[in-house]
Amino acid sequence: MTEDLCLANAMLVLPGETLRGSLRVTGGTIAAIDSGAAVPTGAVDCGGDYVAPGLIELHTDNLERHIQPRPRVDWPHAAAIMAHDAELAGAGITTVFDAMRVGSIPSGTGRYLKYARGLASELLELRAAEALKISHFLHLRAEVCSETLLEELAEFGTDDRVGLVSLMDHTPGQRQFRDLAKFEAYVKGKHAMSEDDFRRHVAQLTALRGKVGDAHEIGAVAQARRFGAVLASHDDTTGAQVETSAGYGIRLAEFPTTIAAARACRAHGIAVMMGAPNLVRGGSHSGNVAAAELAESDLLDIVSSDYVPSALLYAAVRLGQVWGDMARGLSTVTEAPARAVKLEDRGTLAPGKRADLIRFRLRGEVPALSGVWSRGRRVA
């Protein structure tokens, strides 16, 4: 149940500026914004804290981590979904596109099985029962180097809240894993493969990509259009790959791996999204281009928490400090992702928008959250 709310004497993070003022919420919607430090009767005195739109997360692996907290451990899904939901709310995220892999390899070395349809159904049931704190959409990660992609995509329909489909290609030797040594370290560490198993795995994936990859890519583009979902590329590395993405109508690039690819995205009008952990750590764990380098070159539009939910707000604040513009930094996790996935009812503080809000102050350079609201209801 939502309640009327007034947050006053706050630094409001508005489109293009920060402004000392107050914000009033009625019925889950922002009703009014006023300037000045006055604290009306009954209002919450924020004492100069920042008040910003709730964060919008387009690509997070966090739900997968909850359903499989250890290799071969399948956690009860309803409990995992609600824990994931609460964790995101606690990190200031009020809208999430839950990433789920579609496309499995049930045979050979390095097998992995389908899970997305069942997990999505459980999530949507919890949402319908109003058991979740924040707004959830589906992000289907279409793995083109797989055996079952098109069959799995066919299991989803227009009522499944599929808001985003990304084209994934994790074939060894290109994109994220163009450095085979890093791919070997990643796979052996995750799956405890022997040397022989690893060689067979690489050969299997390479053959599979050659056999079905192009057809899967084209089919995934068609399925995204059937869902009415936004289509994204993933790990573009070269100008040629970006040109292919643009030809599919893609306007969002997840984690381009080189500055050349990011520049090509800018030339084609494709928004560039990078990972918050990359920015916080000062580089990519896969050895790809640093998010900070793209930010300094004005080639970064959107930030995703990727595998650390709490990194999202931290990275946006860091960008605000790098750019000398807190409103611009916060826009990478609010206004820009909302625009990329065509959510017009949220992402900015303005009358008529959803009252998805966060309140925070800085402890040194680290943001400390003190309140999170989803449609005017406090969730953290």
Image: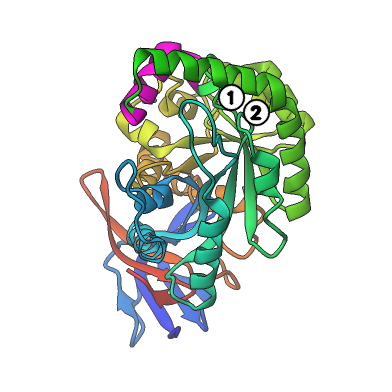
Q: Is residue 348 visible to us here?
A: no
Counting the numbered discs, the total is: 2
Pointer 2: residues within 10 angstroms few (<14), some, or many (20+)?
A: some
Give residue 203's quadrant in the image. Answer: top right
Q: Is residue 186 magenta?
A: yes
> What residue is drawn where x is 48% and y is 78%?
25
Rendering coords of residue 373 (x, y %): 41, 70
Q: Quadrant of the N terminus?
A: bottom left
Give residue 210's quadrant in the image. Answer: top right
User: Is disc 2 in contact with disc 1, using a CB cutoff of under 8 Å?
Assistant: yes
Rendering coords of residue 171 (x, y %): 56, 22
Q: Is residue 153 visible to us here?
A: yes
Rendering coords of residue 356 (x, y %): 47, 67
* Disc 2 target residue: 266
Q: Main secondary structure of the magenta part?
A: helix
| Placement of 137 over or under 352, stated as above or below | above
> What residue is drawn where x is 47% and y is 41%?
303
| Placement of 24 over or under 169, stated as above or below | below
**Which numbered tag is attached to residue 262?**
1
> What residue is drawn where x is 60% and y is 21%?
261
| Label 1 SS | helix
Give residue 124's quadrant in the image. Answer: bottom right
The answer to whether 317 appears left or right of 247 in the picture is left
Rendering coords of residue 309 (x, y %): 36, 49
Q: CA distance from mark 2 to mark 1?
A: 6 Å
| Label 2 SS | helix
Q: Which residues are magenta?
A: 177-191
Tell me the amino acid under the disc marked 1: Ala
The answer to whether 126 appears left or right of 307 in the picture is right
